[in-house]
Amino acid sequence: MLKKKTMLSVSIAALLCFFSLSACTQDQSGSPGKITLELFSNKAENVGTFQELIKKFEKENPDIDIELNAPPEADTVLKTRLVKNDMPDMLAIGGNASYRELANAGIFYDFTGNKLLDKIKPSYLNMINLLSNEKKGTFGLPYATNANVAIYSKDKFKKLGAAPPKTWDEFIAILEKAKSANEVPIYFTLKDAWTGMIPWNSLAANLQGDQFSEKKNSGNASFQSNYSETADKMLELLRYGQENKYGYAYNDGNKAFANGTGVIYFQGNWAIPEILKLNPKMNLGVFALPAANDPAKNKLVSGVDVLFTLNKDIKHPKEAQKFLEFMYQEEQAKTYINEQKAFSALDSVQQTDPALEGVQNDLKNEKIAGYPDHYYPRGIRPENLIQEFYIKQDKKAFLEKMDHEWDKVKNRYN
């Protein structure tokens, strides 16, 4: 009897040992011998592209599983997870005000000295570093970029005898020609507050002056003194919009423009695939909105649409680095920008889509400026204040309110 009990105890111990060893060699999904890394994305549009690239990576690296997580309301989800101390291993997010808050909170990996930095255009690295200016280091690797553009119908420009303008006065002259031809010069979608930021940023980036945010915070700049010309020119553009420009949203605009309403449509490069889905034969072009009459002063407003970063406490940094190195190979970078109609942050990768050729020289020569609103305090909700300005068109009250709201948020955290 004692012998049987002893044998039973040995068997149980052996089983426990076996299961313990198994637990040590499998990830949370139960794949034996594999390491799982969560990749959190806040961009629903690129899920399909990421899924295919991940499959390719996993085939080349059978010991690593990449678990893609792209939830609705991703920014809110991410902040909730931050509070719960449950940050993802890897993140693919925009280089915007949300990134700034998270980077300055000190939760991201510092890539200083990482060999991948040598592949990235300096201007985009500078944008990212400026966003995280409260922390010394580089906390994100720019991957894909976007741009605010004036999308135009090449066929309608040809009928008008117009060419992409290089100056503000040339641009206004085209709008006047379109108006005289009974066309809608600009199709606006101001029901969605965020769409109003596209022409606003295009003007402000070139007219507000250098380092506005830093100067504003130090008391050496203000909306009232630095944004008067931006506000005036924005009001002028609104005169060339369609009736009830505040009654149409982004999807409405894509559909209307695809169906031939409007000569110019202020959007980002991301709208082009949506328009072409609706009208594959549409002959589209793009150019940077020229805010000034000196062509040398006009820059394309561009930003980091997707950057990669890591949780600073990531448990498997070597495997994450292997995935990043895979994504920053030219082949993968080209696949991404071609499918997403995006631009690349990599020096060696160019977007060759004919519809986007109008801004290629700006990108190649890094004649670009960052999005001004990425440096505004998120607490002021600038898109809502600017939408209100478009509706009321009271410039003095608007500029005063922008200063007041900025100072209020700044003082709250001082």
Image: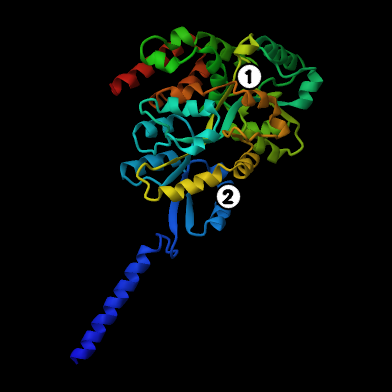
Q: Is residue 166 above or below residue 256?
A: above
**Tag 1 secondary structure:** loop
Q: Residue 289: percent from the left, percent from the top?
A: 63, 19
Q: Amino acid at mark 1?
A: Leu
Q: Quadrant of residue 331?
A: top right
Q: Residue 8: percent from the left, percent from the top?
A: 25, 84
Q: Is residue 37 visible?
A: yes
Q: Which residue is mark 2?
A: 53
Observer-nearest residue: 314 or 294?
Answer: 314
State the residue at coordinates (58%, 27%): 247
Q: Residue 154: percent from the left, percent from the top?
A: 76, 26
State the residue at coordinates (59%, 32%): 347
Q: Quadrant of residue 199?
A: top right
Q: Quadrant of residue 272?
A: top right
Q: Which residue is mark 1?
A: 289
Q: Amino acid at mark 2?
A: Leu
Q: Is residue 193 above or below residue 239?
A: below
